[in-house]
């Protein structure tokens, strides 16, 4: 199953050089999303991070980050039979939130989650498309923990191993379908 996901990533993710700015190789996932078999394979591969060796779900919630994390985390939540929780850019959620600010290459960004979206003690799987510097994922882990949840796994389509994303997550378990 993970092999099928890796094959799909190799075939259907497009490298776009110097986008959105010079020096960045942007991983364009839109061809993958447009391919039913490929999209199905990566959702199954990501969902494996939320199952035990018998295939049973080991998480209570799947968290995805705006915007591309939503595309993968929501179907993974359905596959596991658990709820999906969105982590959103600041100012989008109408209820009481926890907020975490984190550094970008230039400046700062803030992510939010509804305080009541994750109950204390719930076990959480965090999903995004790309792990780069790890700032987004680290902020998301901090938000889950602010709710009292426990991040049991983080999983990504692609990990850019020349960047320090894994180190930013410290002791939090990290897997990726492809390591680049
Ligand atoms: P970071 O916080 O640096 O780990 O960046 C992760 C976020 O930025 C993810 O939500 C990705 O969608 C996006 N991202 C970072 N680098 C790339 C890249 N080379 N191609 C596509 N998306 C990227």
Image (spheres, helix red, strand yellow):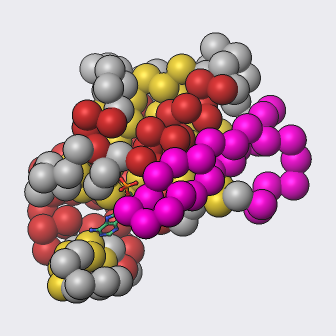
Which residue is situated farthest in the top direction here? Answer: 121
Residue found at x 47% / y 52%: 103
Residue 100 falls within the magenta-colored stretch? yes
Residue found at x 32% / y 74%: 29
Residue 79 at least partly seen: no
Residue 77's image quarter?
Answer: top right
Q: Position of residue 93 (x, y in %)?
A: 79, 55
Side (left or right) of 90 relative to 74:
right
Residue found at x 64% / y 14%: 121
Q: Position of residue 124 (x, y in %)?
A: 53, 29
Q: Quadrant of the C terminus?
A: bottom left
Nearer to us in this view, 85 or 7: 85
Side (left or right) of 133 relative to 151:
left
Residue found at x 23% / y 84%: 22
Q: Which residues are magenta?
A: 91-116
Q: Position of residue 165 (x, y in %)?
A: 28, 44
Residue 132's image quarter?
Answer: bottom left
Q: Is residue 128 above or below residue 71?
A: above
Which residue is situated farthest in the right direction here? Answer: 95
Q: How many marks?
A: 0
Side (left or right) of 178 relative to 152:
left
Residue 20 at least partly seen: yes
Residue 31 falls within the magenta-colored stretch? no
Q: Position of residue 4 (x, y in %)?
A: 17, 56
Q: Is residue 3 above or below residue 173?
A: below
**Where ligand 1 lies, by image quadrant?**
bottom left
């Amino acid at each position: 199953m993970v092999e099928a996901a890796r094959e799909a990533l190799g075939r259907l993710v497009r490298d776009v050089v110097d986008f959105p700015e010079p020096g960045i190789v942007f991983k364009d996932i839109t061809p993958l999303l447009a391919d039913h078999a490929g999209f199905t394979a990566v959702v199954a591969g990501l969902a494996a991070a939320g199952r035990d060796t018998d295939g049973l779900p080991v998480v209570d919630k799947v968290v995805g980050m705006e915007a591309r994390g939503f595309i993968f985390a929501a179907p993974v939540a359905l596959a596991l039979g658990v709820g999906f929780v969105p982590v959103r850019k600041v100012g989008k959620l109408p209820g009481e939130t926890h907020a975490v600010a984190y550094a970008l290459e230039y400046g700062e960004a803030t992510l939010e989650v509804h305080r009541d979206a994750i109950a204390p003690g719930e076990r959480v799987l965090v999903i995004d498309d790309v792990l780069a510097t790890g700032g987004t994922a680290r902020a998301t882990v901090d938000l889950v923990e602010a709710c009292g949840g426990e991040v049991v796994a983080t999983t990504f389509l692609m990990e850019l191993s020349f960047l320090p994303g894994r180190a930013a997550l410290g002791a939090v378990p990290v897997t990726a379908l492809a390591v680049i």
